[in-house]
Image (tube, rainbow, N blue to C red):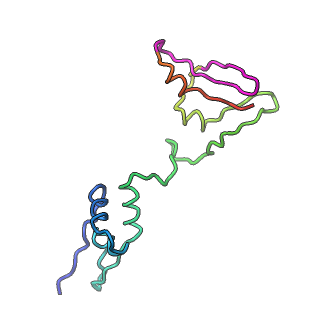
Amino acid sequence: MAKKKNPEPLDGENLIRKVKDLGNLSKEEKARECGYYTVTKNGVERVNMMKFLNALIEAEGIQLDGKQNGNGRGGRSASYRISVQSNGNLLIGAAYTKQMDLKPGDEFEISLGRKHIHLRQVEAEAGEEEEEEEEEELSLAV
């Protein structure tokens, strides 16, 4: 008896195209047709739905995992709320500065409103467009 070989599963655009072509088939049949199954020692085919669905999610470009910082540690996520500390300071945490890709030494101009504080990043180069300045502007509700 000839042993069946495990197929090479499709991925990326080929996977998306094949799934669309298979139209009305069940999920399991689509997974099998796209190569997401294994053949056991006894010759039984087993559909690997998790690999199929994960490959489909990846092919569509959907990111389910949160963005990790460079050192592989989780850390705290930004809550977009801060409070005044007992010494009167407002501390903007590392989660925010990392998200904006700020580096040590980056400078900001502070302007005070009635119930808000605006931080505008001071650009090193003089000819920056106003649109870029607006993108870099942070508003803090007080």
Q: Is residue 14 magenta?
A: no
Tell which of 51 and 24 is nearer to you: 24
Residue 89 lies, in percent from the top left, at 76, 28
11 left or right, relative to 84: left
101 lies above or below 16: above
Residue plotted at (77% across, 32% down): 84
Residue 103 occupies which quadrant of the picture?
A: top right
Residue 18 occupies which quadrant of the picture?
A: bottom left
Q: Is residue 112 magenta?
A: yes
Magenta residues span 108-127
Quarter of the image for the C terminus: give it. top right
Q: Residue furthest front?
A: 24
Residue 125 lies, in percent from the top left, at 47, 14
Q: Residue furthest left?
A: 2
Residue plotted at (31% across, 63% down): 20
**Magenta-drawn stretch, dominant element (helix, strand or loop):** strand
56 lies above or below 74: below
Residue 34 lies, in percent from the top left, at 28, 68
121 left or right, relative to 57: right
Residue 91 lies, in percent from the top left, at 70, 31
Quarter of the image for the N terminus: give it. bottom left
Q: Residue furthest top?
A: 126
- In this rendering, the count of numbered labels is 0
12 lies above or below 111: below
64 left or right, relative to 91: left
Residue plotted at (49% across, 41% down): 70
Residue 5 occupies which quadrant of the picture?
A: bottom left
Tell which of 50 and 18 is nearer to you: 18
